[in-house]
Image (cartoon, coloured by chain):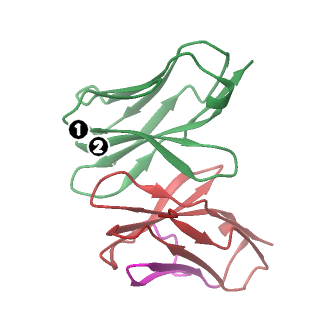
Chain colours: A red, B green
């Protein structure tokens, strides 16, 4: 398996624009997680899914953030409208049950 | 609320030294504890996972211990090498949830 695949690797956008981050989990994994990493706050869990169903979205900072998982092999994290304080590295991870979480390489988002 | 603390924040050692990284957590009701490695600009790589019922796990030159009652874990790296230079993150999976709570990490530099 190629591991968790995220796209794009880098995204530069202007404030107010819509941003969509994409993730393909490892085949067979039933959990998918979205994290955000910043220098100030470290790694924070935004939302996670189990069998494509959102289980806990308490980490989603605002209504501007939304996440979907239409099927077992694809998830998106959308920010609309984006703001400069959303600049961070966004990671997607997947796992089988409560075992090791495997992380993607991340998307580095810069909102100007 | 679970909080994870890692000490020291940064560490610089000469090649060949044995070293210990520390992790503490405030709520002992954890499902497991994981140690990750993060290289600059990259995602996280899982190093070791210790279930709550276990005391330690070993992989090559790495040994992680867990003392749940005192809320502590250590990562021991034997005979350090320049290739071990990275940030090491500790994370706990709290019981009843599937949320990994991360520490801020220890930035390790091993110089030749």
Circle 2 marks a residue in which chain?
A: B
Q: Which residue is mark 1?
A: B52
Q: Residue B32 got which mark?
A: 2
Q: Position of residue B13 (x, y in %)?
A: 66, 17
Crowding near the residue tagged with mark 2, few <14, some 14–19, many ≥20 C-alpha atoms within 10 Å: many
> In which quadrant will I find the C terminus of chain A?
bottom right
Q: Position of residue A76 (x, y in %)?
A: 52, 80
Q: Which residue appears farthest toward the left when viewing the image?
A: B53
Rendered residue at 39%/31% (across/down) = B24
In the rendered structure, the answer to whether residue A56 lies left or right of residue B19 reads left
Which secondary structure, mark 1?
loop
Which secondary structure, mark 2?
strand
The question of residue B80 being in magenta is answered with no
In the rendered structure, the answer to whether residue A112 lies left or right of residue A43 reads right
The question of residue A60 being in magenta is answered with yes
Quarter-wise, where is residue A110 in the image?
bottom right
Q: Give A86 or A95, whichever is nearer the viewer.
A: A95
Crowding near the residue tagged with mark 1, few <14, some 14–19, many ≥20 C-alpha atoms within 10 Å: many
Q: Is residue B94 above or below residue B48?
A: below
Q: Position of residue B107 (x, y in %)?
A: 63, 33
Query: For the residues marked 2 and 1, what is the alpha-carbon distance in whole angstroms?
Result: 5 Å
Q: Residue A45 got which mark?
A: none
Question: Count of labels shown?
Answer: 2
Magenta residues, start to end: A59-80
Q: Is residue A104 above or below residue B64?
A: below
Quarter-wise, where is residue B70 in the image?
top left
């Amino acid at each position: 398996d190629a591991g968790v695949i995220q796209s794009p690797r880098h995204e530069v956008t202007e404030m107010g624009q819509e941003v969509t981050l994409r993730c393909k989990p490892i085949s067979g994994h039933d959990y998918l997680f979205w994290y955000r990493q910043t220098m100030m706050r470290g790694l924070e869990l935004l939302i996670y899914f189990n069998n494509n169903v959102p289980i806990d979205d308490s980490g989603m900072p605002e209504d501007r953030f939304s996440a979907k998982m239409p099927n077992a092999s694809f998830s998106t994290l959308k920010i609309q409208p984006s703001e400069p304080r959303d600049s961070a590295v966004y990671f997607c991870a997947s796992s089988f049950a409560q075992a090791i979480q495997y992380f993607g390489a991340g998307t580095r988002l810069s909102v100007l | 609320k679970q909080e994870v603390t890692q000490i020291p924040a940064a560490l610089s050692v000469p090649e060949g030294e044995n070293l210990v990284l520390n992790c503490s957590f405030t709520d002992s009701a954890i499902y497991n504890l994981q140690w990750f490695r993060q290289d600059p600009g990259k995602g996280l790589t899982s190093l070791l996972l210790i279930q709550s019922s276990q005391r330690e796990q070993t992989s090559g030159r790495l040994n992680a211990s867990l003392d749940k009652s005192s809320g502590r874990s250590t990562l021991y790296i034997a005979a350090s090498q320049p290739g071990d230079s990275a940030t090491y993150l500790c994370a706990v999976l709290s019981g009843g949830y599937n949320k990994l709570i991360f520490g801020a990490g220890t930035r390790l530099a091993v110089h030749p």
